[in-house]
Image: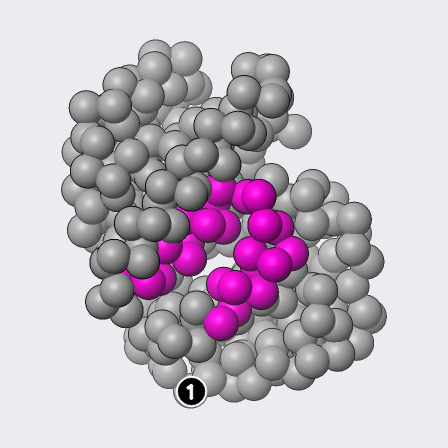
Amino acid sequence: MKKLLILLLQIPFLACSQHKPNPEAIKLNDSAVELMMASPVISNEDSSILNEINIQAKQRGERRHSRNKLKDTVINDESQYKKAIDLLNKATQIDGDYFIAYLNKMGAQTHLKLYKDALTSGKEMTRLLPNDGTVTQIVGMTYERSGDTLTAMKYYNIALTQLDRALASMSINNKHYNNIKATKAEDLVMLNRIPEAQKILQELYNTADENRKELYKDQMTWTRNDFLNGSKSEGALTEPAKK
């Protein structure tokens, strides 16, 4: 789940802040997140990523979540995630345009390897953010995890076009620029265009602060399977992105 969390952080959340979620749906989403966070399937590296999500949620006016119940150990507690999915299903039934609820649901479904259900959630995310290359890439990776590599490659190509378009439309000083550029590098890896990806990651490494350097240096060695499985995720973010 860690790799998915890194990807989700790269989604420009301001794009989905225009919709004000239904208050009851927010409560259900918050309860689902509490269940997933209370189930100690999330490591300390994941903790820092979730903290970043909470910071972004606060800026959107949503409630943050306590981390007091997180433990250091990793225990596979599927029941917590299944209960969380039930709550998130209720949230999206109440508010069909609640992006964050679909995002959390897809994360839980991916963790449980419910890829068909995760694709359904991903398609709803695509409906809400149809031009977001990160969302498109996540859906592609879910297709690949489900065994449909052909469809996955189509999504990676679409994502690359969307990411290029996004980068061309913004200043290099935009707070989302480097995240989108890093996502492009990952997409190039998924398309087996490794030299191009490594060139981008080297450029990001050369201008990054020390915490980001660790992430980019680590990602330079990642294979397609590493991105799919998150098996080399020690370089997870350790501080909030600058706002």
Local crowd size for mark 1, using a 10 Å CA cut-off: few (<14), some (14–19), many (≥20): few
Residue 65 in the image, given as x and y percentages of width and height? 63, 62
Q: Residue at x 31, y 24 (%)?
A: 201
Q: Amino acid at mark 1?
A: Ser
Q: Is residue 165 left or right of residue 182?
A: right
**Which residue corresponds to mark 1?**
79
Q: Is residue 172 left or right of residue 139?
A: right
The question of residue 127 being in magenta is answered with yes
Which secondary structure class fits the magenta region best?
helix
The question of residue 38 being in magenta is answered with no
Q: Is 54 above or below relative to 182?
A: below
Q: Is residue 8 left or right of residue 189?
A: right
The part of the image, by quadrant, that contains residue 182 is top left
Residue 7 in the image, given as x and y percentages of width and height? 43, 47
- Work out which quarter of the rendered image holds the C terminus and state it: top right
Residue 117 in the image, given as x and y percentages of width and height? 44, 77
Closer-to-camera residue (36/216)? 216
Describe the element under mark 1 as helix, strand or loop: helix
Closer-to-camera residue (236/141)? 141
Residue 14 in the image, given as x and y percentages of width and height? 69, 41
- Work out which quarter of the rendered image holds the N terminus and state it: bottom left
Closer-to-camera residue (4/116)? 116
- Colouring: one colour
Magenta residues span: 120-145
Q: Is residue 11 left or right of residue 107?
A: right
Please identify the residue farthest to the top as the structure is shown: 206
Q: Residue at x 60, y 40 (%)?
A: 12
